[in-house]
Amino acid sequence: MGARTQLYSLTALATVVLTVLFAGPLLAGFPKAALAAIVVYAALKLVDPREFRRIAKFRRSEFFLAVSTLLAVVALGVLYGVLAAVGLSILDLLRRLARPHGAVLGFVPGVPGMHDVGDYPDATTEPGLVIYRYDAPLCFANADDFRRRALAALDGEKRVEWFVLNAEANVELDITAADALRGICDELRHRGITFALARVKQELREDLEAADLLGLIGSGSLYPTLPSVVEAFRERGKAHAEPG
């Protein structure tokens, strides 16, 4: 209605209270069809088609949730409709957690830092070094996907010596993800590949220690930054290249 202040809300509240207190007998004489029409009209005013278009433009899954919530409220009532919306939102969150974005990182000419090689056709990787980033907290929903895609990142490289997990997005992990990480460590050891972690947050470090993974990985294989990993890898290569 174009109201811009809280005075409108207070006026509407006062009107509703006065109607409930003093206009009950008058409303009792109204035909039910007329009251239903008023309720339907008020409900339709709550639905903003422009907002639905905005949601649909942003993300299709969000639009599906909005429409599902609307239908659930109409069919089940407000309480159960809201509960259904919460349940669907949790399922959508788990769906996105189950298969997040992942990337092998490399160098891009003229761009500082390391970036997703899939975003830059001219990106290059360090020979023998695979740095992989998995853009989600590690949990039961994505543990198998994480293990499979992390190991698949090795297939595109030849003679891999080091595999480094860039853990900047992995703020924590649960026991299922810890088992998946242990499986990756075992597989890499079987292949003769060194495993290391970079950009490990304190919360993740504590989880690794609680899962007895810190000793398996080795505190010396935790690096604060990606450049420090690359430098350590290159220095190791120089040391092996020196005679005697």
Image (tube, rainbow, N blue to C red):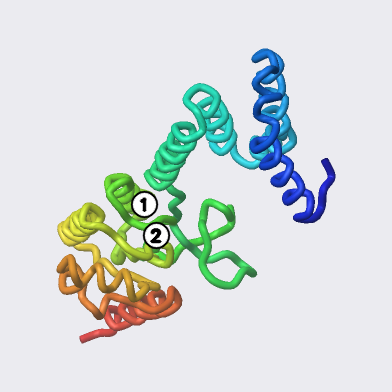
Q: Answer with left or right where residue 79 lies relative to residue 122.
A: left
Q: Secondary structure at mark 2?
A: strand
Along the viewing direction, whichever of 57 and 193 lies nearer the viewer:
57
Going from N to C along the chain, the mark reached first, 1 or 2, is 2
Along the viewing direction, whichever of 222 and 230 lies nearer the viewer:
222
Q: Which residue is mark 2?
A: 132
Q: Which residue is mark 1?
A: 153
Q: Residue 163 is drawn in which quadrant?
A: bottom left
Kindly tell me whether residue 12 is visible in this rendering.
yes
Number of the label disc, if any, that sits on residue 90: none
Q: Answer with left or right where residue 177 lies relative to residue 105.
A: left
Image height check: is 234 above or below 29? below
Image height check: is 239 above or below 197? below
Q: Residue 24 is drawn in which quadrant?
A: top right
Q: Residue furthest right?
A: 2
Q: Tell me the amino acid under the disc marked 1.
A: Ala
The residue at the point 37 percent across, 62 percent down is 170
Q: What x and y, as percent, mark residue 34?
A: 71, 16
- How many other residues sit within 10 Å of disc 1, few (<14), some (14-19) or many (≥20)? some
Q: Quick one: quadrant of the N terminus?
A: top right
Kindly tell me whether residue 128 is visible in this rendering.
no
Q: Residues at badges 1 and 2 in contact (C-beta under 8 Å)?
A: yes
The residue at the point 53 percent across, 32 percent down is 69
Q: Tell me the amino acid under the disc marked 2.
A: Tyr
Q: Quick one: quadrant of the C terminus?
A: bottom left
The residue at the point 37 percent across, 65 percent down is 171
